[in-house]
Image (cartoon, rainbow, N blue to C red):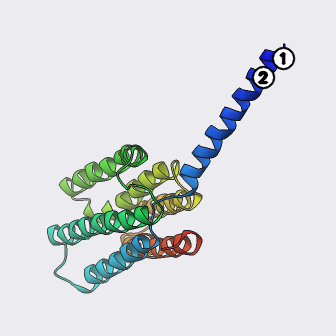
Amino acid sequence: MTAFTGALDEARDHLKVIRQTMERSTQYSTLSGWSGVLIGVLALVCCWLVRTSAGVTGAREIEVWGGALALAVAIEFGCNKRRAGQVGKHVMSRLGAHILIAAAPGFFAAAALTGFFLLHGLGLYVYGVWMLGYGIAICAVGLFSQRAVSVLGIGFVLCGGAALLLPAWSHLPLLALSFGGFHIAYGLVLARKYGW
């Protein structure tokens, strides 16, 4: 009986260590506050460009947002790589691969629906699709990260759903609110809690 009790205590100790290790891996992230702020500012600049440039419509508008997406990915990777070095982690890790796999369906759905909407002359609605797809991807990433990431994802899902139900004139302001405002607020929250 004593051997059994000792084995049970040892198993409990192992489970406690495993749980603490898992909690630490999700508590301390390589996410950067700078990336959120910079991506938010980039989104606001692009919204302003689209709003003020009468010639930026259709294919040109997709080019503007495609360029913004490429720049945002570069910013995210660069800032997160720098942040990972500060906290003694690697940006390209097993957890990072799981995060990419979790986010991929949301991004793929947004890309596929964007193509569908554009082919069928429904380009006015792609902003809502982008917010929804991004929000779904971010909610999936939130399963591996801090609560702030999940809150960000939920905000995008709500804005995307609203954009698909509201008149077309509201879509660009909602895009500015979500991709611009939410990212900046999220970046500031991360920076305050975990540093830049």
Q: Amino acid at mark 1?
A: Thr
| Callout 1 touching callout 2 (CB < 8 Å) | yes
Q: Position of residue 47 (x, y in %)?
A: 32, 78
**Along the line of sight, which residue is nearer the eye, 165 or 5?**
5
Identify which amino acid the numbered label 2 is placed on. Answer: Gly
- What residue is shown at x 65% (from left), y 40% (from top)? 17
Q: Is residue 19 above or below residue 38?
A: above
Q: Secondary structure at mark 2?
A: helix
* Residue 64, picture quadrant: bottom left
* Res 41 visible: yes
Spatial distance from mark 1 to mark 2, Cα to Cα?
6 Å
Looking at the rendered structure, the number of numbered marks drawn on it comes to 2
- Residue under label 1, please give it: 2
Q: Is 28 placed left or right of 110 in the picture?
A: right
User: Where does the N terminus fall, quadrant-wise?
Assistant: top right
Q: Position of residue 124 (x, y in %)?
A: 29, 65
Q: Position of residue 37 (x, y in %)?
A: 43, 76
Give me the disc on residue 6.
2
Location of residue 80 in the rendering, given as x and y in whole percent from the top left corner: 39, 64
193 and 143: which one is in front? 193
